């Protein structure tokens, strides 16, 4: 077994420039894959974060908002009881016009919009927390136009843009990862063919002495696997660097703080890193194996 | 040990058969010269024995293997029981003399300590005890061929095939190589040597199998190279 490792190292050294190119392409591909995986995790967590916060708001119409500050009138109590009995709903909170105005003042403290808004602009609302946040649209349909209701808003639709943006980032990285992976596969395949070609005489002699096909070809496979694993390690290092240099600052910065949860070191090293190593090794091995089967006949 | 039964070989690119209905039987422990002009089918015959090619028709036996029908994954097994030596030596250029010989043992999975004792022994046998750490490029032709013979013999093969082993060597060195092959033959290894070397064949007086145009032309025990010429 020592022999095959030695041969593999010799092979990698012999085509040093090709080996480096192989490692870099593999690393970029796996790095993009890793970025995509991190994006998926971030999206999941962002969704969790938001879905615990967002609700469906049933805004009450002007007469009810104005005349029924503690939800004791028939229209408001009917709505409330009906919502509470709805299986889609986990809980219902009433927010009067004054409470809404107080919250508004808190949120926009010190901003000019405060001068423009008076309590009369804001409706009283029933805040509906959903059992399943994804089915808010059904509440919107069931309660729009009911007596005492001004309109029903599913807050999820207001954050949908954010999610679709994150989703696009994820898809784009995956597409790039695939394109780059194709380049990496072709390079690995080509390098193995080259490697096998430069050593065809040697391999021929080995075969004559009775070496099995397996014995002569394992060094090439190991070359490929080493490439895949080194590429994965570099990719992980790249992700760590990107996290420290770029993402940490971006996600804790003013624009995105508390909007997108930060990415932890354990996400990169504990979860994504090992996946990249396994994916790198498996893909490189598969490429190597197929190449040897199809193109290398000695 | 070696048996060819009505063996023919036609290469796809050629109309004339490289071997044409050849039947030969070589007993265990024999020393046989295979002679004939270039293109007479000597190399083809050796290729069939090594399973580098399969016969078009007929059967090739080596020991108990039906070589032509051997599954390709069993070919290494066959070759591990055969030694082969070539005109161009075919040593691994980036390995030392000792490593070249050790390789034949590594391939069949011999343990390291066995390799360490067997390699010097066989190097002594071919009188290259002091050159274990040389690279093939540092050797003379005769030395390189002796390394190749040592490699072929180190596994104690049933059969040793030699394809023009003296073709690149001066007459004196060639005689040395043939003597070495004879010594190996005396250990019980069957030796089949393809050659052009009239002098060697005539001086050795061993069995001579002559091919001509792919056909068996002559099979003499204690023969000489060119009785007819």
Image (cartoon, rainbow, N blue to C red):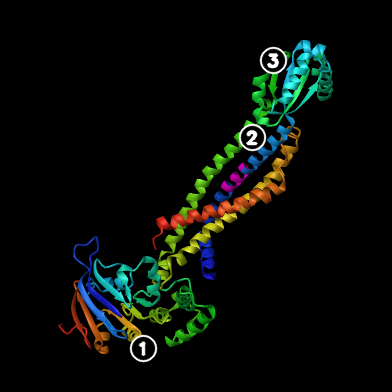
Residue hosting label 2: A166
Q: Which of marks 2 and 3 is nearer the N terminus?
A: 3
Disc ID at residue B183? 1
Residue nearer the viewer, B190 or B62: B62
Quarter of the picture holding the C terminus of chain A? bottom left
In x, y percent, where is residue A270?
Answer: 68, 51
Label 2: how many residues lie within 10 Å, few (<14), some (14-19) or many (20+)?
some
Q: Main secondary structure of the magenta part?
A: helix
- Residue B59's place in the image compared with A187, above or below, is below
- Residue A160's place in the image compared with B14, above or below, is above
Q: Residue furthest left?
A: B228
Quadrant of the rendered image containing residue A125: top right
- Compute the Cα span from label 2 to label 1: 79 Å
Q: Can residue A260 be seen in this view?
A: yes
Residue hosting label 3: A146
Left or right of A249? Residue A170 is left
Residue nearer the viewer, A263 or A240: A263
Q: Residue furthest top?
A: A63
Looking at the image, which residue is at 39% across and 69% down? B74
- Compute the Cα span from label 1 to label 3: 110 Å
Q: Which chain carries label 3?
A: A
Looking at the image, which residue is at 26% across and 89% down? B203
Q: Which chain carries label 2?
A: A
Between marks 1 and 3 in the image, the one whose residue lies nearer the viewer: 3
Residue nearer the viewer, B2 or A140: A140
Q: Give the range drawn in magenta.
A: A29-36
- The reply to whether the magenta stretch includes residue A226 is no
Left or right of A25? Residue B20 is left
Say what secondary structure mark 3 lies in: loop
Left or right of A39? Residue B104 is left
């Amino acid at each position: 077994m020592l022999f095959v490792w030695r041969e593999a190292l010799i092979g990698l050294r012999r085509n040093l420039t090709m080996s480096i190119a192989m490692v870099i392409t593999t690393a970029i591909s796996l790095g993009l894959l890793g970025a995509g995986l991190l994006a998926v995790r971030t999206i999941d967590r962002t969704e969790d974060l938001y879905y615990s916060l967002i609700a469906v708001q049933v805004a009450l119409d002007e007469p009810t908002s104005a005349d029924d500050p503690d939800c004791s009138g028939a229209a408001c109590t009917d709505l409330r009881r009906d919502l509470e009995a709805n299986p889609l709903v986990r809980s219902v909170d009433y927010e009067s016009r004054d409470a809404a105005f107080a919250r508004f003042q808190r949120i926009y403290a010190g901003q000019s919009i405060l001068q423009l808004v008076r309590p009369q602009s804001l409706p009283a609302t029933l805040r509906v927390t959903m059992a399943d946040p994804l089915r808010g649209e059904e509440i919107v349909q069931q309660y729009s136009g009911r007596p005492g209701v001004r309109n029903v808003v599913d807050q999820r639709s207001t954050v949908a843009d954010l999610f679709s943006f994150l989703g696009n980032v994820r898809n784009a990285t995956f597409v790039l990862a695939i394109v780059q992976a194709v380049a990496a596969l072709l390079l690995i395949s080509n390098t193995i063919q080259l490697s096998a070609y430069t050593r065809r005489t040697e391999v021929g002699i080995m075969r004559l002495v009775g070496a099995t096909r397996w014995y002569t070809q394992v060094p090439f496979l190991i070359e490929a696997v080493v490439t895949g694993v080194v590429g994965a390690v570099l990719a992980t290092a790249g992700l760590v660097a990107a996290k420290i240099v770029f993402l940490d600052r971006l996600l804790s910065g003013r624009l995105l703080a508390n909007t997108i949860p930060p990415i932890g070191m354990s996400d990169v090293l504990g979860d994504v890193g090992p996946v990249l190593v396994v994916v790198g090794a498996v893909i490189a091995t598969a490429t190597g194996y197929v190449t040897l089967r199809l193109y290398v006949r000695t | 040990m070696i048996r060819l039964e009505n063996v023919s070989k036609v290469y796809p690119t050629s109309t004339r058969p490289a071997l044409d209905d050849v039947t030969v039987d070589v007993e265990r422990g024999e020393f046989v010269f295979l002679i004939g002009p270039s293109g007479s089918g000597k190399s083809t015959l050796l290729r069939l024995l090594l399973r580098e090619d399969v016969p078009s028709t007929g059967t090739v036996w080596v020991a108990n293997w039906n070589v032509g029908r051997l599954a390709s994954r069993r070919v290494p097994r066959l070759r591990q029981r055969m030694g082969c030596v070539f005109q161009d030596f075919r040593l691994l250029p980036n390995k030392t003399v000792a490593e070249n010989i050790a390789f034949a043992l590594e391939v069949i999975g011999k343990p390291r300590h066995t390799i360490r004792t067997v390699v010097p022994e066989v190097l002594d046998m071919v009188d290259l005890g002091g050159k274990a750490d040389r690279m093939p490029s540092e050797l003379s032709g005769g030395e390189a061929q002796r390394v190749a013979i040592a490699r072929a013999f180190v596994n104690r093969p049933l059969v040793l095939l030699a394809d023009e082993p003296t073709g690149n060597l001066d007459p004196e060195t060639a005689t040395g190589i043939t003597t070495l092959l004879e010594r190996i033959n005396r250990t019980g290894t069957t030796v089949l040597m393809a050659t052009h070397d009239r002098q060697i064949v005539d001086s050795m007086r061993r069995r001579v199998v002559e091919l001509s145009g792919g056909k068996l032309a002559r099979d003499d025990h204690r023969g000489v190279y060119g009785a007819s010429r």
